[in-house]
Image (spheres, helix red, strand yellow):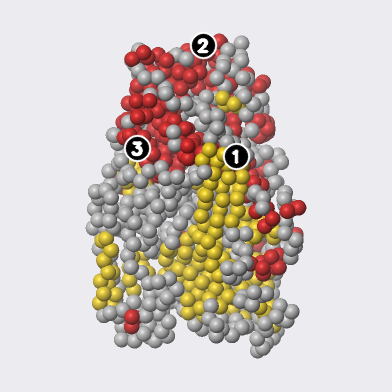
Amino acid sequence: MSGICDPLKPAQGSPLLARDVPDVVTITSTCSEDRTRPKASHEFRFQGHPKPGGAIIYQIGDGQIQAPGPGHAFPPTHFVTTTRQPSIPTSSSSIVARDATTNSTTSVSSTQISHETTGSFSTSVSDVSLTRLTTSAVQSATLPGPTSTSGSINSVLQTSLQPSAPPFPTSIGSSDISIVNPSTLPSPSSTSVVGTLSASDIFRPIGTGAPLVPDAPKDHPCPRIGIQPQSRRLQTNKFYSALFLNEQKSPVFTFPYSVQWAKGDGQLQSWGFVVSHTEPEQWARADGQPGKDAGQWAFFGAPVGVEYIILSASELVVNSANMTPGLTTDTLEWGSVKANLFPPEWMTPVMTLPLLQGSAYITAEYHWGKPLIQSSVGFKNLTFAGALPNNLTHKYVAYLHNNHKWLIYITPLDSSYEVNRFDLDGRGSSINGPSLFNGVIQVAKVPRADGAATLNVRDNASPETDPEVIYDQSAGTYPIGVNITGTVDGKTGSYTLSWTKNGTQDQDLLMFALPHHTESMSYPDQNGLTNLQMRTTTKGMATAVKGDSWTMTEKDLPIEMGFSPWTPKVGNVDRYSDPVLEAVESFGADDIREDILGQTNVSSAYYDGKALAKFAAICYALHDVVGNDTLALSGLQPLKQAFGHHLENRQRWPWVYDDSWGGVVSVASYETNNPLEDFGNPYYNDHHFHYGYFVYAAAVIGYLDPEWLANSTNTDWVNMLVRDYAGSDLDDPYFPFSRAFDWYHGHSWAAGLLDSSDGKNQESSSEDTMASYAIKMWGSVTGDQYMEARGNLMLAIQKRSFADYYLYSSDNNAQPPKFIGNKAAGILFENKIDHTTYFGANPEYIQGIHMLPLLPFSTYIRDSKFVCEEWDAYFRDPDVIGAVSGGWRGILMANYAMCNTTTAREAYEFFTADDFDASYLDGGASKSWYTAFVAALVDGVIV
């Protein structure tokens, strides 16, 4: 594909022998581009060896890939390392940028993680191959072995490697403004409100043109470690980025399991993949603090690094030349990745793990290696249970020393495989498989009998109640990729996740669904729901579902929501009493006299975007709420000028196109070597927050000025930002598909190329919603019904997922009861939730970051029941709210208006008071918009 490197590589699953490689072969791959930019050439030099299995090492990108052929038993005589010689130099920066972790790592002792003491056990290993489930051979450990269930907990939020500035600047300033004659300017010709909406394919491409910003001055400072060339743009914010960041050792959270490369660490010093799942009693938690937390817990999270099961191979060891195994990734898609482990000097992987969210089994494809299944917790015993009914897959049952039960499924691809070839060693630390095994090994944990929860759709669950039976019925089948489609028809939208499967094709896949999936799953997919459930750390109880696809349906899309203040009861509020109109007009006249150019150019894409959105809302309120075209269009002129300042790339930190990862980024980190500059934007942090504000502002400008909208440079530039954070085209040559929004989790992840042992995270659910609302409104104004439909469906999905995972009403049953009293998550990671923020721990910060900005979507996401409960939990005491200073006071009061009509009147009186303190307005808010917003919550009628 244009713009992407795709050099020659060995066929997947076919070992490449040294004897198959000429003495010296040069393979050159040149990236062809549709735009003018330096071409990247990659040269690979292979040197063969006199014997099969000789050592070969080659380098691709920034990561070393080592691999061999099946003749690896022959000792290598020599090897040659090769180098990459790109026309754009690869950065050798030593910056190690991490996402939020902790100031201190707390070692969790075995007693904290349900460790049980062990003794020695007798051994009884059958030498008879068993083929029926009704017979068994039990192997037990006889010697003292590993029994470690220790892990580490990141219990203190570290802000030194995470942007910690507040979410708004404090300087306002004022300037002169020229009053225009509206009769000389065009009037809005588009509408911001639709009565109906239909889109059969919400993922239509936005565009494929080259980005309208210059190329980055050099290769991105974050190296692409071990990433094999592929045909699509790389993902930066997805669940698997730990595989190519930093030391490649942080976990990948697939839900309900986590997987991480052991990389020679741990008690067993393994080089395989650790597979973990923790129970709630193993989690760490911190008690809530009076004045900060309304819940009993302020924090909870699972330990990492507990080596329950390790999928490895005997070939994965450090060799005599002190060369170590390597990890590479390929087929990096929005919802899947393949992780490969290479023994030293091999040219093809000995094992490959297809990793997908919701996988019921962690699956390893073995390529002519000797399987090694390990456990630092220790195997108490291993039972061979024979062949499954499909007669293709063989089953083992393993009990660990903590009494957790794991199932191991063996599906050989070699017809000569002899069954029952896996043996438990005497110490109980490892299970050894046969040499030259070619096939699939899957592991799955059996949940405890007391770990189940009641399904809302229990009546539709499949009849099997034994978790083992459910696992057995799909073992041997596994997903290797996932596709998404979506449709919208009126206020109903649906999206379908369809998996590509490998292995046994005539049986259903088994995948785990999260609560927001099961709540919205459509018939007949509900028939696939089973009684097999596993607890996740941060997303409640996952339910196993049989089927190769799921369809989820949302029936309350806010398609009629426009730019006006909106309520669930009335919809778009477009009628106000005279006192309200007079107040909004008076405040708006002052607001547009602020220093628009100064506030929108403060060395931060985030701050600049918030300010642009603020003035866009002011202009809209003056135009459509008040009907004062003169003031509205007078404010619109400097707003367009300020927007054009960024469109022309004249801001303090210009934007550049990063061809390494595929995105529009601030040039800040290239110049300062600080990955956290501009809230981490250069490392793909928060792009949906930053660019969402720009897209919303552009939608308002385009609505008010059709001539501006008709300029293709303007629309292409805004579409570029949408493509960056919310691309809809899998094959976009410049941007990845859906960088921020996670279609499995139902919300976005803010963390980009910053490594964290607790996975991806997001701090502001409301700004996530803002990004989706911006897509909806830009699609509406530009007439792109597919984009508009996609934004509407994203909002509906977020409404559901946030109610489960972020914003907790008293009846929330997804999160732990001792945490939901906090009402809002704080920072939600894949592996923990911490009721705090990166910039402080005041309640107004923690709750308020999930409120701002207050715009029409706010009343859709934050229902009145939740708003009232949250207010009562934190701010009901007049002394408490009276002590809140700065822009947080305005945020809290505007949010308070959403509780009921009485609180809306109180908020109106607050903002319209003669002695109102302007410091209560943050850099993204205005008195005129807040006044219109809160007045709408009493139907605009205030006298």
Quarter of image, res 234: bottom left
- Whether pointer 1 and pointer 3 mark residues with C-beta atoms closer than 8 Å, the reply is no
Circle nearer the N terminus (2, 3):
2
Residue at image mark 2: 582
Question: Does dot 3 land on a helix, a strand or a loop?
Answer: helix
Question: Does dot 1 land on a helix, a strand or a loop?
Answer: strand
Q: Is residue 637 above or below residue 135?
A: above
Residue at image mark 3: 717
- Whether pointer 2 and pointer 3 mark residues with C-beta atoms closer than 8 Å, the reply is no
In this orientation, does residue 93 appear? no
Quarter of image, res 862: top right
Tell me where residue 313 appears, x and y as whole percent: 50, 76
State the separation of the CA atoms marked 1 and 3: 31 Å
Amino acid under label 2? Glu
Q: Quadrant of the N terminus?
A: bottom left
Circle nearer the N terminus (1, 3):
1
| Residue closer to the observer: 811 or 732 | 732
Count neighbours of disc 2 (C-alpha within 10 A) and say few if under 14, some if 14 to 19, many if 20 or more: few
State the separation of the CA atoms marked 2 and 1: 38 Å
* For residue 648, side relative to residue 881 (left or right): left
Instruction: Report the mark closest to the observer, 1 or 3.
Output: 1
Residue at image mark 1: 492
Residue at 27% of width from left, 69% of height from top?
27
Tell me where residue 647 appears, x and y as whole percent: 32, 34
Q: Quadrant of the C terminus?
A: top right
Question: Does dot 2 land on a helix, a strand or a loop?
Answer: helix
| Residue closer to the observer: 936 or 812 | 936
Quarter of image, res 546: bottom right
Amino acid under label 1? Thr
